[in-house]
Image: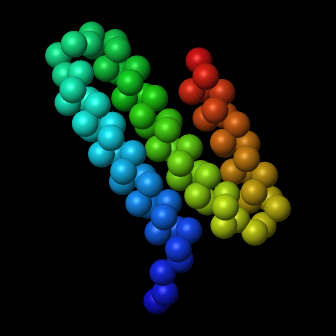
Amino acid sequence: MGWDGDDLAGKMEEVFERQQAAADARANRGTSSVEERAKSATFESLRLSRSRIMSQLASATSPTHRTMLESALKSINDEMAK
């Protein structure tokens, strides 16, 4: 089974982003309220979902699947903008 360079790069980027988020969380531990932490966790979840969808969109070939992924991406972007 061969390695897809784009897929591997995407996974490496996700790992790096998670490590950065964890480091940021450790640095800010105890300085935020429960609501701020919940909002931050929700944003992080949306960010990871967005990254996963973008990776899938890069390899999607079916027009119907691409349309569904683009719609999901728009929804996530709208939610992150709030």
Vertical relation: 63 (above or below) 50: below
* Left or right: 75 in relation to 19: right
Task: Identify the residue at horizontal 35%, vertical 21% (top origin).
Answer: 38
Most distant residue in the bottom direction: 1
* Left or right: 45 in relation to 64: left
* Left or right: 17 in relation to 52: left
Query: Number of labelled discs?
Result: 0
Residue 5 location, x and y as percent? Answer: 53, 74
Residue 80 location, x and y as percent? Answer: 57, 27
Q: Quadrant of residue 78?
A: top right
Q: Quadrant of residue 17?
A: top left
Vertical relation: 47 (above or below) 7: above
Q: Nearer the viewer, residue 31 or 1?
A: 31
Q: Quadrant of residue 27?
A: top left
Task: Identify the residue at horizontal 67%, vertical 57% (top origin).
Answer: 57
Residue 70 location, x and y as percent? Answer: 73, 47
Residue 66 location, x and y as percent? Answer: 75, 57
Most distant residue in the right direction: 63
Question: How are the colours assigned in the image?
Answer: rainbow
Quadrant of the frame with the C terminus? top right
